[in-house]
Image (cartoon, rainbow, N blue to C red):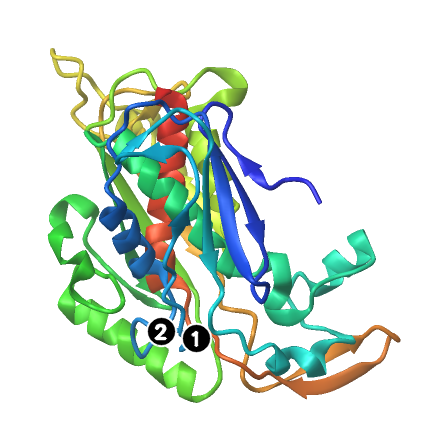
Amino acid sequence: MSGNTFGKNFKLTTFGESHGDAIGGVIDGCPAGILIDLDFIQTELDRRKPGQSKIVTQRKESDKVQFFSGIFEGKTTGTPIGFMIPNENKKSQDYDHLKDFFRPSHADFTYQQKYGYRDFRGGGRSSARETACRVVGGAIAKQIINSISIQAYVSSVGNISLTKNYNELDLTLIESNDVRCPDFEVANQMENLIKDLKKNGDTIGGIITCVIKNVPIGLGNPVFDRLEAELAKAMLSINASKGFEFGSGFDGTTMFGSQHNDYFNVDGTTKTNYSGGIQGGISNGMDIYFRVAFKPVATLLQKQEMLSVLGELKEIEGRGRHDACVLPRAVPIVEAMAALVLADFII
């Protein structure tokens, strides 16, 4: 299986499966002499870990990262940074009844067809458990680009959406509630919806908005290595992501060019920012902002029709511990992937 490495200059390679002994990764290309705050890395992992609230999966993982190389006396040495996160709370028996079945909208069928063999326990390599490794890489990337601010938040769950844009919100409130939405009233509506669906064994999707401030001018390259293209690849590599738009996005298609153009101020900033901080594939110094759409979680704790390896259809009920909505835990993952992209270009 290829495709386990992300980045060109600052590279993250991840390994491991949801129900293996551990997951982990290797970071290559990190400059030497970077002061590393290990507590910050653990805090980022805690934002993603399961069991942190009543609206996420109750799998109990401490997600304590262990570093084996590349860091000495609190600083990076420039050599590969190796790390591991043990899987402490596996309940693989919850998946025994799925050994010979393909769940709808999962990677089961495509993995089996492509590789001829698969780890059916919790989705194996296709599990979102792998994203913990991305958070570690992103937390180190954030410390390389520490002058840049990256903040993501849940802007919609199902048909419940924020009506304000990011510069009308108090983004310091993102971590003040379990949904990670910077509006208490809307967050409460979102949380109630997720709880109701969880009781019924159903799931819901939504949108995460990410805002990047203090971006230097000049990140990104023309043609195939455009900054927005790399951000899109990063976001669409996250489990359950189904869409990406930056700046005015699809709404820009309803505007006239005379309305959409970002006219200059004398200092090179722009009066509006429909471009989303990127023009010609290169950052222009304005805020970068984008949205990522996530589908409803495909695992339902109710009966669904599944396909067997023998080509038979059968109704089977899901078991185990699963998120009714991935959005709250995906916020730090979106930030981490954005940080990896920016660190890659800066290095």
Residue 41 location in percent, x, y? 29, 48
* Residue at 63% in and 62% down: 124
* Residue at 39% in and 27% down: 30
Residue 191 location in percent, x, y? 28, 75
Residue 328 vertical position relative to residue 93 in the rendered view, above or below: above
Residue reaching furthest to the top: 266
Type of the residue with mark 1: Arg
Give the quadrant of residue 117.
bottom right
Residue 257 vertical position relative to residue 43 in the rendered view, above or below: above
Viewer-nearest residue: 127 or 137: 137
Residue 174 location in percent, x, y? 19, 57
Asked if disc 1 and disc 2 are in contact, CB closer than 8 Å, the reply is yes
* Residue 48 relative to residue 28: left or right: left
Task: Let me know if residue 158 appears in the view.
Answer: yes
Residue 290 vertical position relative to residue 185 in the rendered view, above or below: above
Type of the residue with mark 2: Gly
Secondary structure under the numbered disc 1 in the rendered image = loop
Earlier sequence position, callout 1 versus callout 2: 2
Viewer-nearest residue: 314 or 250: 314
Disc assigned to residue 51: 2
Secondary structure under the numbered disc 2 in the rendered image = loop
Q: Quadrant of the C terminus?
A: top left
* Residue at 50% in and 39% down: 26
Q: Which residue is mark 1?
A: 59
